[in-house]
Each structure stands twice: as structure tokens, then as C-alpha cells.
Image: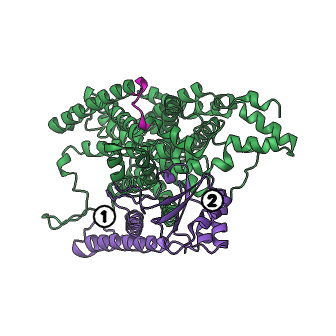
Amino acid sequence: MSSTKYILGLFDDPDEMMHGIDELQKNSIPIYDVYTPMPIHGIEKKLGIKDSRLGWAAFMFGCLGGTTIFSMATYMLALDWPMNIGGKPAFAVPDFIPITFEWTVLFTAFGMTATFFYATHLFPGRTPRVMDLRATDDRFVIAIDAKGNIPHDDITNVLKQAGAVEVKHNDRKYVSYE
Amino acid sequence: MASHSESIIREPLITGKDITYAKITNDILAPVERMPGRAWWIGFTVASLGACLWVFAVSWTFWYGIGEWGLNKTVGWAWDITGFVWWVGIGHAGTLISAILLLFRQNWRNSINRSAEAMTIFAVICAATYVVSHMGRPWLAYWPLPLPNQFGSIWVNFNSPLVWDVFAISTYFSVSLVFWYTGLLPDLASIRDRATGLRRKIYSFCSFGWTGSVKTWQRFETVCLILAGISTPLVLSVHTIVSMDFATSLEPGWHTTIFPPYFVAGAIFSGFAMVQTLLLVTRKVLGLENYITMFHIEAMNKIILLTGSIVGVAYLTEFFIAYYSGSEYEQYTFLNRFIGPYWWAGCMMYGCNVLMTQLMWFKKIRTSIPIAWVLSIVVNIGMWFERFVIIVTSLHRDFLPSSWAMFYPTWVDMSVFIGSIGLFFTMFLLFIRVFPSIAIAEVKLILKSSSEQAKKKILDHGGLDPEQVQFYKESLVTFDSVEIADYEKI
């Protein structure tokens, strides 16, 4: 039993990496994850990753923001302390539109981004879980869980033939831990 | 990514030979990873002296009150609100580039969005400091917030554009900050993974544990798209509301329904001018000519020309409506811009903003870096005078001739303004020192489709319409980062 935990296929070109994914899938080798220095369009479909639902979160937060400030303005100006401003109605809906809009945007932005950070486990000071340090520079990395996926040499060959410039057999999952 | 080849008639967005993904990272991170050069230190010294002047002048204002400014009973708003509107306007270009151009799928934004967004944030900080210091009693700055209080509670008046403005500016600032910082995460991770020691720890903290996995990127792109979608109406609303600070009054010269679109166009106009002022120097000093190319410069000049012309049309409309309204006071206000004691400010406004920008119709001028830089400064000056004319020239002579007065700035007024420019440049210089000034991941995204080398490959491959090839070669002549000699054989 080898001590390899993860097999990484490092590509220097996104199109060749996509080809690598195809080849691995053809050989029924499950892919753990892919790390790239930039977003790769079309990869989600290939890996069967569902659409992000962050749009729904954004919509909900937007509704919450708009409702909050509109209710606040209504309570403050029309219910709690109505003022006579030139005899005009206290419940002045057109005047509430700008602030309602602003808070819709504000809540959408903060709510959605916070949801994104929460769902992706991003927060200040989080220890980066990096499998290869060049994945944020110029390497497109396909990671394969070595456990159960044997023989490892075959995986290496598939990756090499698909155009991987380097194949790594890592004994540790994350190289970024000190 | 199904890399596709882009048509040859589109100019390249990345120039230079042998540009690889690694080279992009190296080039863009070089200013962050090496010690800054002499140009940076000189700039930083001058800018931080300005920032010190700002601290001194604002402290002086806080201590002695706004009586230290040149304001009087007639002219109650002058350089303070002029500076505020000027800075907020400058900020608008950043959001336009990062949000509106993203929605329109303008790939050239990828090289300039990062620094433009940073500029937005610093400009809005400068603007916000004006708001606080012009209050006179800045320790009561929380009064426009709808907080429970012991006066009743008597609440803020949501019918007032000034309250709308508090909401608009604070939302604009915080949403821009979120947008900018989220976009920075992948690039901070790039720095982190190359750094060692303490630097690594700091960037590790700041990069939130970014890994660049598929799901992360997918969510990241969703977030950026939605942020762009909501920032687009937001940026339009912000300057609309700023203009309503004036437009909802009864002051001749302010009481104008054209103000919202006119202010928004003017804001984008001045913002692009400031982006141009900054980037033309930055690309040279940081050696980023391959990423911020002549195409970017010319595209920004075209936007300056377009928005400058919209502003010109708005000026003409204002004059016509003043005449057509039949209102004596309105007519006098606009006449007063030319024949009154502030005629020189009016000339600066109309001359710099309308006449000078019309020069941009000539390609020679659009593609000349020194002229474009000078014109960008001219636009900045012109837009400052536009706000000065709208605010001071309208206020100083309105309904009652017995209360007509002039405004004379004191040294405090001037120091706050000059100091705010110093503050802005201090923040910008620090930014290019510690953060990548170009969005690395986004530039990598267009390397395979829109770079000069990719197009060269198509050219070498042959089989293209000779007319298109000729067009492409001619378009490259203006680029200062392309070696034209390489194209002679083709």
C-alpha cells in the first residue's frame, strides 16, 4: 500500500486540462476537485456541478432590505410621529423609493457575499487548504483521491497522455500547512 | 473553457511576445513583491505631505468650526460641496468599469477594473470626509441616521434628499468595497502562494483561505455578476440623488429636472478622466504597458468624448430651458455665468468640459499618450469648475439683490481641497504597493482569445481576408507596446 493520498495532474493550459478531465472520465476515474488560477467556463457541466443558488439568496436578501427600510420609514414618519410638512401626506410613498432602493441593494450585496463566504468557508485568517502552490499562478490542477483509485500508475499515464506537464503523488492532502 | 479565437479585426487586449500565465503573474505582482522604485517614493512623499496638510486643515476646521472657511450668509455651500460632488463623481468611473462594462461583456475592462475600483473607494472616502467636515459639529454626524433618540423619538425626515444622500453614499461605498475586495481574493491568494514568512502570513489572513476550486470559482462568478447587476442601478442612483440635493430646491440654477442624467454623465466623464490620469502614469512606472494597451487608452478616451458630449448637450438644454421658462431669475442665473463676476469660472467649465473634449474626435489625439494625459487633467479641472459654477455662482446672486455676495476661499478651504488630493494619491500609491493593480485572474481569462500572440498565431496560419489583415496591422501602428516590424512579412 503506497502512502500516496492525492494524485495531482498539473496542466499548463486550460484546454488541455479539460481534455484531461475527459480522459479521466472515460477511464472512470473519479475527480476529487480541480484548482485553477482563473474561472474555467464550462467545467461545472463537465464535472456535474449544480448551478449556484446564490442568486436566490441575493433575491431574498434584497426583498428583506427593501421591506426593512420601507417598514421603518412608514413606522417612523406615518405612525410613530407624523409631521405636518406643508400639509402633505405623512405616508409619502414616492419619497421612500430612493431609500428602499438603496437598502435593497445594500442587503443584497452584503447578504449574498456573506452567504458566499459562509458556503465556501472563506473568512479572514482561514488556513488555506492548497494542494499545489502553483494552482493560483500558472498550473491547472486536477486532484484525484488516491484512496481506492488504483493502480496509481495507470492514473499517472492517463494524465500524462492527456498532456499533463507534471504528475504529483502527494503524501499530504494540503501542502500549505506548515 | 472552450477557448475560441477572436476575430482578427478586434485589437489585442494583451500585447507582447511569449506571454504565459506565469509571466502575467510575475509582471503584475512585480511592483508588490519588489521594493518600490524612486518614482514611487517621490510620489508617495509628495502625496503624504498633501495628506498631512489635509489632516491639519480638517483638524483646524473641527477645532475652530466652519467659520474658518470663506462661507457667508449668501454662499453657504462652496468649496466643501464642490469638493464632495467632484470626488463622488470621480468615483463613478470605477463602478462603471467594474459593473456596467461587465454586464456588457467588454473584455477590455479586465485590465483596468481593479485600479478603477480602488480609485472609486478612495474618491468616495475623500468625498465622505467633506460631508462630515462641512457639518460644523461632526460629532453629531450620526443625526441623519434613523436611530431612536431622546427628542421624542423624532425621526429623520425620509422626504429629504439629504437623508437619501446619506443612504446612497454609504451604500455605494460599502457595496463598492465588498465588490472590490471579493474580486481581490484570488489575486491575494496568488501573492500568498508565492510569499514566505510574515508576508505569507499577512496575505494568508487577507485571502480568506482562497483555493480556486471549481465550486469557489463558480460561486465567485455568480457573486460578481449579481454585484455588477445591482451596482449598475446603484451607481446611477447615487449621482441622481446627489443631483437631487440641488434639484429639489427652489434655487435658480439648481431647480432643474435635467440634473440627474446630467450629473451622472458628468460623473462618469470626470471619473474616466481621473482613471486616465492615474493609469497613464501607473502603466509606465509599473511597466504594465502590455496589459493596459493603447486600445484601453483609446477606448477610455472615446467614453470621455461621449460623456463629455452628453454633458455639452445638457449645458445647451439648460440654457434653452432657462430662456424658454420665461422666469426672470432663471434667465439671470444663466446670463450671470458669463457676464457676472464669476465669468472666468463659467469659461473654465464650458471651455474645459465641452470645447477641449471635442478634440477627442481626432484619432491622433485619442492615441497620443501625452495629449490624452493633459486632456484628462483639463477635464478634471473643468469638472471641478462645473460644480463650483453650479453651487457658488448660483448661490451668490439669487432672488434678493441686497444679499448678493462673493465667495472668497480662505487658506483652510484651499488646504482641505489640496489636502484631499494628497490623501487620495497617498491611498492610491499604497494600494499599488500592497495589492495587485490589475486583476490577475481576469487578465489570464482573455490571454488565449484576445492577446496579440494569439492573433499573431492566426495571422501566421494564414487564410484570412487580406483586407482584415491590413486593417488589423494598421490598428496596431498606434500601440506603443507592439513591435510593428514583426508584422511586415505577413
> Chain for mark 2?
A
Callout 2: 10 Å neighbours few (<14), some, many (20+)?
many
Chain displayed in green: B
Where, quadrant-wise, is the N terminus of chain B in this rendering?
Answer: bottom right
Query: Where is B367 relative to A50, above or below?
Result: above
Q: Is residue B403 left or right of residue B18?
A: left
Callout 1: 10 Å neighbours few (<14), some, many (20+)?
few
Question: Residues under labels 1 and 2: Cα distance?
Answer: 69 Å
Can see residue B181?
A: yes
Chain displayed in purple: A
Q: Is residue B273 left or right of residue A92?
A: right
What is the three-letter code of the residue carrying label 1?
A: Gly
Return the residue at label 2: A17
Query: Where is A87 relative to B299, above or below?
Result: below
Residue, x 32% and y 47% (percent of image)? B202
Percent x, y of residue B318: 53, 44
Q: Which residues are magenta?
A: B32-40
Q: Tell me the quarter of the picture where residue B195 sits.
A: top left
For the rendered model, the colour scheme is by chain
Where, quadrant-wise, is the C terminus of chain B in this rendering?
Answer: top right
State the SS at label 2.
Answer: helix
What is the three-letter code of the residue carrying label 2?
A: Met
Front one among B416 and B472: B472
Residue, x 34% and y 31% (percent of image)? B422
